[in-house]
Image: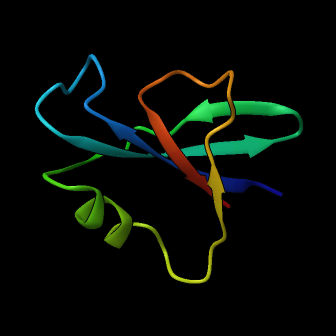
Amino acid sequence: MTMIQWTIYDHPADYPLGWVVRPWLISNGTVLSSPEAYFCESLEEARARIPKGLERLPRFSDDDSVIVETWI
């Protein structure tokens, strides 16, 4: 079984012009970045890319500073 976790980034190094939404695939203790990425102009646009029905987790204090939130 694979779980998908979605992370929203605020102007990350690989896309400093805006916001990025990336899904992460979690299966059998392995976390893999999906080849998908959505590039957005605002946090609201990024949040609109998150599939409906998921729960938002705020960033943890030890997360990279460009991580805004994660959805599972």
Horizontal side of 69 relative to 50 (left or right) equals right
Residue drawn at 29 percent across, 56 percent down: 43
* Coloring scheme used: rainbow
- Looking at the image, the residue that sits furthest to the right is 28
Q: Quadrant of residue 37?
A: top left
Q: Quadrant of the N terminus?
A: bottom right
Residue drawn at 62 percent across, 50 percent down: 58
In the rendered image, the vertical position of residue 38 relative to residue 67, given as above or below:
below
In the rendered image, the vertical position of residue 59 relative to residue 3, given as above or below:
above
Q: Quadrant of residue 66?
A: top left
Residue 42 visible in the current orientation: yes
Q: Quadrant of the C terminus?
A: bottom right
- Looking at the image, the residue that sits furthest to the top is 13
Residue 37 visible in the current orientation: no
Q: Nearer the viewer, residue 37 or 42?
A: 42
Query: Residue 4: image x %, image y %?
Result: 64, 55
Residue drawn at 47 percent across, 23 percent down: 65
Horizontal side of 72 relative to 51 (left or right) equals right
- Looking at the image, the residue that sits furthest to the front is 61
Q: How many labels, in total?
A: 0
Query: Residue 15: image x %, image y %?
Result: 20, 27
Query: Residue 11: image x %, image y %?
Result: 25, 31
In the rendered image, the vertical position of residue 7 relative to residue 54, given as above or below:
above
In the rendered image, the vertical position of residue 40 relative to residue 31, given as above or below:
below
Residue drawn at 66 percent across, 70 percent down: 55
Horizontal side of 44 relative to 58 (left or right) equals left
